[in-house]
Image: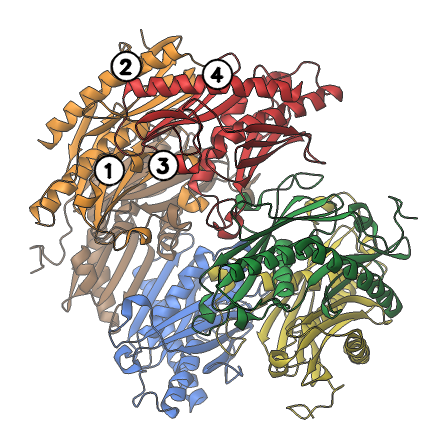
Chain colours: A red, B green, C yellow, D orange, E blue, F brown
Amino acid sequence: MRHDGRRSDEMRAISMERAVSRHAEGSCLVKFGDTHVLCTASLEERVPPWLRGGGEGWVTAEYGMLPRATKERMRREASAGKQSGRTQEIQRLIGRSLRAVVDRAALGERQISVDCDVIQADGGTRTAAITGAWVALSDCMTYMMSAGMITANPLTDHVAAISCGIVDGAPVLDLDYIEDSSAHTDANFVMTGSGGIVEVQGTAEGAPFSRDELTALLDLASGGISRLVDLQKLTVA
Amino acid sequence: MRHDGRRSDEMRAISMERAVSRHAEGSCLVKFGDTHVLCTASLEERVPPWLRGGGEGWVTAEYGMLPRATKERMRREASAGKQSGRTQEIQRLIGRSLRAVVDRAALGERQISVDCDVIQADGGTRTAAITGAWVALSDCMTYMMSAGMITANPLTDHVAAISCGIVDGAPVLDLDYIEDSSAHTDANFVMTGSGGIVEVQGTAEGAPFSRDELTALLDLASGGISRLVDLQKLTVA
Amino acid sequence: MRHDGRRSDEMRAISMERAVSRHAEGSCLVKFGDTHVLCTASLEERVPPWLRGGGEGWVTAEYGMLPRATKERMRREASAGKQSGRTQEIQRLIGRSLRAVVDRAALGERQISVDCDVIQADGGTRTAAITGAWVALSDCMTYMMSAGMITANPLTDHVAAISCGIVDGAPVLDLDYIEDSSAHTDANFVMTGSGGIVEVQGTAEGAPFSRDELTALLDLASGGISRLVDLQKLTVA
Amino acid sequence: MRHDGRRSDEMRAISMERAVSRHAEGSCLVKFGDTHVLCTASLEERVPPWLRGGGEGWVTAEYGMLPRATKERMRREASAGKQSGRTQEIQRLIGRSLRAVVDRAALGERQISVDCDVIQADGGTRTAAITGAWVALSDCMTYMMSAGMITANPLTDHVAAISCGIVDGAPVLDLDYIEDSSAHTDANFVMTGSGGIVEVQGTAEGAPFSRDELTALLDLASGGISRLVDLQKLTVA
Amino acid sequence: MRHDGRRSDEMRAISMERAVSRHAEGSCLVKFGDTHVLCTASLEERVPPWLRGGGEGWVTAEYGMLPRATKERMRREASAGKQSGRTQEIQRLIGRSLRAVVDRAALGERQISVDCDVIQADGGTRTAAITGAWVALSDCMTYMMSAGMITANPLTDHVAAISCGIVDGAPVLDLDYIEDSSAHTDANFVMTGSGGIVEVQGTAEGAPFSRDELTALLDLASGGISRLVDLQKLTVA
Amino acid sequence: MRHDGRRSDEMRAISMERAVSRHAEGSCLVKFGDTHVLCTASLEERVPPWLRGGGEGWVTAEYGMLPRATKERMRREASAGKQSGRTQEIQRLIGRSLRAVVDRAALGERQISVDCDVIQADGGTRTAAITGAWVALSDCMTYMMSAGMITANPLTDHVAAISCGIVDGAPVLDLDYIEDSSAHTDANFVMTGSGGIVEVQGTAEGAPFSRDELTALLDLASGGISRLVDLQKLTVA
C-alpha cells in the first residue's frame, strides 16, 4: 500500500484542460495530482539559423518553475541570471520528445516553442510537462490547419511520459514528491501512442538496480502511458 | 464610450481567489479582466544582511511574466540571463507599496517574499500584482498569528493600485492593453485603504499633460482603489 | 529654515557648462549644488532594429555613477557585471523625458545617445541629469543643423526636472542628500518649457501623503522648473 | 560489418594511463579509440554548505572540451560566459555515477572533484569520462589511505560506462562519431563491477525503438562494461 | 617635428589638481594634454579574504572610461555586462605600480581602492592614471596620518608613468592618440622617484624593434618621469 | 646554483611535438620542463566584422588552463562564467606575438584561431604557449599551401618567448614555479628569429629594478630565444 493509498500501477488523478491561454496558438493546463504545469505553444514564422532555407521546421521547449511552486521557495532563475543544469536538462528532454512525433518537413519553415511552466510541484513535473505539451502542440497544429497554413497535420503520433520508481523495494507508477524523495531507483519513460520508446532514463539513487527491476518499471510505464494517451485523445477530440 | 463598452470610471471584472497554492503561506490569483497574476507570499526566518540584529523584518517582491502571457511570445528572462529594466522597476514598486503598510518591528526579524507572476497579460499587470499581493501578504500574516509567531498583525492598512490614462482625450480608469497602447498619458496610483497616496507615477506618452488632467486621473483612481479595497476586505473576511 | 539655510522654494546653486567634451557632438557639465553630472550627446547614423526603414530617429540615455561619487564607495557596475535596478530605472526615465520634446521624424533615421555620468552625488542626480541632458541634446541638434544634416531643429520644447519632498512636515524644493534621507515623501517632476507635465513620480517613504501635499509639491516644482528652463535658455543662447 | 571493420559487440581500442598529472591526487588519461579524456581527481578538505557538520563527504565532477577537440572548432565556454546544457547534463551524470560507488561516510567530510577534459573527441566522450574518472578517483582514495587520512577505502565497487546504438538497423557497441551521427537510437549505460545498473539513458533519434531493441542494447552494454571493469582492475593493480 | 609641434622629448601640458572630490579620502584630476583622468582613493577598514589576520594592508585599482571619452562612443561596460580584457589589463597594471611604493605592513589591515576614470581620452590614459593615482593615494595617506590612524607614511617613494614610441622612425615621448595610432613601437614605463624601474611594457605594432630602440625609449622615459615626479612633489607640497 | 641544478642561462628540457590533434589544421604539444601546453591552430573561412571585404586575414589566440593544471585546483572559468583578467591578458599577448610575424594580406580573408590550453603548469605557461603556437601556426600555413589555398607562406619569421627574472639577486633564464614565486623581478620577452623584439614585459615584484638588470635579462632572453627558434626549425623541418 502506498502512502496515499494508491495501487502500485495507479497514477494520480490526471486532468488536461485545453485553451487556457488567450494568446497562445495552443495551450494546456495539465495536472498529475498536485503537480500543475501550464503548457503553451507559440508559433513563429522563422527557424533557427542552422535550418534556414532547408524547408523544415523546428519544435523546441522551455521549462521553468515559479519560485514558490515548491515546498521551499527557490531562487528565481531570471534573478540568479542563469538556468540551472536541471532546468536545461529537462527542457532539452521535452524538446526531443516532441520532435520525435513531428514531421518537420510537413511543418514547413516555422518554429513552435512550447513553454512548460510549473505552477505547483509535487513530483513528476517533467513527465506532466511532456504529456501536456503534446496537447498544446496538437492544438497549435490544428490552428495552423484551420488557418490554411498547412494541409496535413505534422503530428505523426501521440507522445506522453510517466515516472516510475522502486519505493520500499516495490516498483510503483507515477511518483509524487514523497515517493520521489525516498525511491531507490527513479526512471522516466517517454513513449508514443503506438508503444514505441522515445526516451528512457533510469537512475539508481542508492544501490544499483537490476535488469529485472528495469523490466518491471518498463511494464508499469507502458500501462500508464497507454492511459495518458487515451486521455490526450479525449482531450483533443 | 470605451472600445469594450465600459464607462470612463468603470474597472474591468475584478476577482481575487485566495489559497491557490498548496505550499505558500499566503497566495492569491488576482484577475483584472484578462490580466491574471498569481501572487504567493513566502515566509523566511532570516532578513537581508543590512537588517540583521536590528529586530525588524523585511517585505520584498519579485515580478515575472510567463513567456506567452503576452500577444507575442517574449524571451524568457531566465534564458536571457537577466531581468529587464521594466521587470526590476515593477518589482521595486511592488515591494515599496507593500512595505508602506507593514509595521516591520511587529513582523520581527523575518522576511516575506511576495512573488507576482503574470500568467496572462492584458494591461495593468503591476496594479493587479500590488492588489493581489496584499491579499497574499495578509494571509501570510494570518498564518503567522495562527502559528503563534506574532501576536499583533503587522499590516497597518490595505494597499491597492490601479492605472488611469487619457485615451482619445478622455480620462479613463483601469486601461486594458488596447487602451494602454493608445493612451496619451498613462498613470499608476497606489493608495491605502484610508485614502493616502503611497505612489503616483504619471507619464506622458506623447504630448505633456496638464495639472487638471492629473487631477482628473487622481479622482478616477481614488474611486477605483476604494472599490478594490472593499473587494480585498470581502476576500480575506 | 532648512539645514543649509535655503528657503523652502529655493534651489541649490545651479550651473550648466557647455562644450566640456572634446569629442561629443553636444555636452554639458551640470551642477545642482554638490551634485555634478557630465552629460554627453553622441550622434550615430543608425537606429535600433525595430525602427529601421521607418524614417524616424531615436533618442536614448544611459546613466552611471563613478564608484566614489558617493559618501561610501559603491561597487563599480562594470565589475559587478550588471546595472542595478535603480540605474536602469533612471536611464529609462531620462530617455523618456528627452523623447517627449523631440520630433523623431524631423531627426531622421539617426540615434542620439545621451550619457549621464555622475561625477559627484549629493541628491537629485536624476533631475540634474535630465536638465543637463537637454543642453547636451540641444547642442547636438545645433551641430547637425550647422552640418546641414537637418534643416529644422527636432527639439520641440525645453525639458527640465526637479525633486521635491516633505521634510520635517514641510514641502521643500530640490532636496540634497541629507534632506532626501529624511524626507517622508519624495517626488520627482519632469516638465516642459511651456509648463506641461512629462513625468511625475511621487513616493511615500513612511506614512502615505495626501492630495494637498501632492499639490504643494507640484507648485514648488513648477516654479523651480521654470527657473531651470530660463537657465537652459541662457546657456544655449 | 561496421565502417571501421569492428564486429557489432567490439569496442574500440581502449587504454587507461594512470598518474599523468604531476599535481592531482589521482589522474587518468583514458582513450576509447580517438576519444581522449584527461581525468584528474582533486581532494579538498571541505564539503558543500548543505553537508557541513554531517560527517559525510562529497564527490562531484566537471566536464569540458578543448575548443578544437572536435572536427569543427567550438566556441570556448569560458569565453561564451556559460556552460552549455549538454555540458551540465554530462557533468551531472558523471558525478551521479561516481557517487553510486562511494561510501560517503567512509570518505569523511571531504570533497573530491573529478575534472574530465576532452582533449580529442570521436564519440562517446561521456562514457570514456566516467570510465577514466573511476581510475582517477581510485588513485585518489589510495593516496588518502597511504596518507593515513582514511583507513578503509570508500570505493564500494567499480563503475564504468559505454554507449550503444542502432546503426543501419543493427545494435552495435561503443559508437564512434560517424556511427553516433547516423544512429537511429543512441543509449548510454553506466554499470558497476558487479553488474548492477547505475544509469540508463536511451534516446530515439528518429523513429522510436522497441523493448526488444532496448534489451539488445543492454546485452551489448553488459558485455562491454564487464571488459572495461577488467581493464580498470589491470590499470590500478 | 611632431604633428603638434612638440620636440621628441617634450611631454604634453601636464596638470594635477588635488581634492577634486568632496567624498574621497584622496583625489586628483590629472591631465596629460587632452587626456583627463579622475583618480579617487577610497579607504576601507577591511582587506581581501586572503590577507585577513596578517596585519598587512592592500592597495588595488579600478579603471574605467566614460562611453564618450573617445572619438567614437564605446559601449558602456556596465551595460555590456563585463569589463574588457584591455580594462582589466590596465587596472592590474595600476594596482601593481602603486603597491610597488607602499609598505603594506605600515598601512595596517586596511584596503585603499583607487578608481581611475577617464573623463576624456587622447592617448596615454594608463600612464596619466598611474601618475594621478599616486597623488590621490598620497593624500589618502596624509588623511590617515592626520586622523591618527597610522603614524608613519606607508608610501616609500613616488611612482609615475609615461608612454614612448617610435613614430615616423624617431623615438618620441608621451604619445597622443594620433601618434599612438601610427607608432611602430609603443612602450609604457613605470618608474619610481629614485629612478628604479617598476614596469616596462614594449610592444612592436608592426616590425619588431631593436635593443638600441628600446634603450632610446628608456632614456626618454627616464627624463619624462623625473619631471612628472617633480610635478607630483609640487602638487602635494 | 639554482634549486634544480640549472645554470643561470640554462632552460628546462624543451620539447615540441607536432600533429598531436586529429582534427586541427596545425597542432603542437610544447613542454618547458613540467609546463605542458597543447596548441591547436584552427582555420576558418571568415574574418572578424571589422576586416570584412578588406582582403586581409586575422590571427587570434585563446588561452586556458585545465582546473588541476596547477598545484591547487582552480575554479573552471567556464563555470565561473568569465575569463580572469590574467587569462585575457595572456591571450591578447599570444595573439599580438603571432600577428607580428604574419603577412595578413598573404593570408587572405581567413582567420586562424590558435588555442593554447595548459595541461600542466610549472611556470612560464605564456612563453611556452607562444613558442608552441608558432609551430601549430606554421603547420596550418603548410596545410593551406598544400591545399592550394595560398601560394606564398604568410609567415615572415619565427617568433618565440621566454621568461627571465632576478632570483636571489641573480638574473636567471626560464623560471619554473618555485623561482617565479620568489623572483624579485619577472620579465617575459618575445622575439623573432632574426632577433627583433616583439614584446618585452618586465615587472618588479618587490623593489624596483635597474637598467643594468633589465639589460642582463635581455641578454639571457636573446640567448634562450635563439635556441628555441633552432628547436622550432628542427620541429617543422
Above or below: residue F20 compared with residue D220:
below
Residue E91 horizontal/vertical position (percent): 41, 65
Q: Which residue is mark 1?
A: D39
* Sequence-earlier tag: 1 or 2: 1
Q: Give x and y (percent) for residue D48.
A: 30, 51
Q: Secondary structure at mark 2?
A: helix
Instruction: Check if mark 3 and mark 1 are on a common chain.
Output: no
Residue tagged 4: D206
Closer to the camera: disc 3 or disc 1? 1
Q: Give the letter of the chain under mark 4.
A: D
Q: Residue furthest top?
A: D1
Q: Nearer the viewer, mark 2 or mark 3?
A: 2
| Residue C119 placement: quadrant | bottom right
Q: Are marks 2 and 3 in contact (CB under 8 Å)?
A: no
Q: How dense is the environment of label 4, judged by Cα within 10 Å: few (below 14), some, or many (20 and up)?
A: some
First in residue order: circle 4 vs circle 2: 4
- Let me know if marks 3 and 4 both belong to one chain: no
Specify whether residue C77 is in view.
yes
Q: CA distance from mark 1 to mark 2?
A: 25 Å
Q: Say what secondary structure mark 1 lies in.
A: strand
Q: Left or right: C181 with respect to F112? A: right
Instruction: Give the residue pinned by disc 2.
Output: D220
Real-space CA distance between mark 2 and mark 3, rounded to the nearest whole angstrom: 38 Å
Instruction: Look at label 3 and name its amino acid.
Output: Ala
Name the foreground residue: E11 vs A89.
A89
Q: Amino acid at mark 4?
A: Gly
Residue E200 lies, in percent from the top left, at 33, 66
